[in-house]
Image (cartoon, helix red, strand yellow):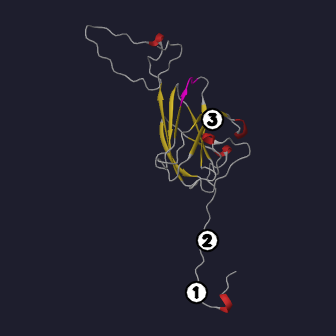
Amino acid sequence: AIDGNDGGEGNYTLSAGYDPNPANDNFANRIVLGGSNTSVSGWNKGGSREVGEPNHAGIPGVASVWWSWSAPAAGRVFLTTIGSTYTPLLGAYQGTNVNALSLVSNGFYSPQPCPGFGFLNFDVTTSKPIQTYQFAVDGELGGAMPLGGIDLSLRFVARPVNDKFTTRLPLTGNFLVATGSIIAASQDGELVA
């Protein structure tokens, strides 16, 4: 109802808005990411927490949203939120039930001096059977700004073809130059000096 104060009259403007829950608010409705280098945008405003949901980055949250991704091979996953409008909490998990997830990696969380920035990374040690990961992005309960826009980027780097001693590459000739990358290389079974 709209009424004037003490019988007062005049013009008024009534505005109302509705923020629907994000489509991936619940774990069961997580959005599937594809590819090895992908970025998506979303928000957690209107989001919620579910019974039994873990604390992402080990910190109580207020409004999580979910994505899912399957690794194409063994390698390393890098997940960032650079460009988000708040400092999100990140968590990477395996499992198919929100109250029985296995933690793979907690994200780095620092509201100062890097607002809007969160990251995590982890190794995918095998791709057989296919490894599927669940990613949660949340806002800190009691945080200064726990809700907002999310820019989530995933980059996957496969292990080098010569990662194992048994798959080493021969070098021949009198003058040798070799280039490559050790990003996502493993140390499985290697001696560490």
Q: Amino acid at mark 1?
A: Asn
Q: Which mark is residue 112?
A: none
Furthest toward the left, the residue is: 175
Earlier-in-chain disc, 2 versus 3 = 2
What's the residue at 55%, 47% (across, down)?
Answer: 88
What's the residue at 56%, 39% (across, down)?
Answer: 107
Question: Left or right: where does residue 43 sit relative to residue 183?
Answer: right
On screen, 87 above or below 20? above
Badge 1 local density, few (<14 within 10 Å), some, or many (20+)?
Answer: few
- The residue that label 1 is drawn on is 11
What's the residue at 70%, 40% (across, down)?
Answer: 98
Badge 2 local density, few (<14 within 10 Å), some, or many (20+)?
Answer: few
Earlier-in-chain disc, 1 versus 3 = 1
Q: Amino acid at mark 3?
A: Tyr
Q: Provide the secondary structure element on which disc 1 rests.
A: loop
- The residue that label 2 is drawn on is 16
* In contact (CB < 8 Å): disc 1 and disc 3: no
Q: CA distance from mark 1 to mark 3?
A: 55 Å
On screen, 134 above or below 139? above
Q: Position of residue 22 (x, y in %)?
A: 61, 53
Q: Position of residue 16 (x, y in %)?
A: 61, 71
Magenta stretch bounds: 122-127
Badge 3 local density, few (<14 within 10 Å), some, or many (20+)?
Answer: many
Question: Left or right: where does residue 18 sit relative to residue 177?
Answer: right
- The residue that label 3 is drawn on is 93
Q: Amino acid at mark 2?
A: Ala
* In contact (CB < 8 Å): disc 2 and disc 1: no
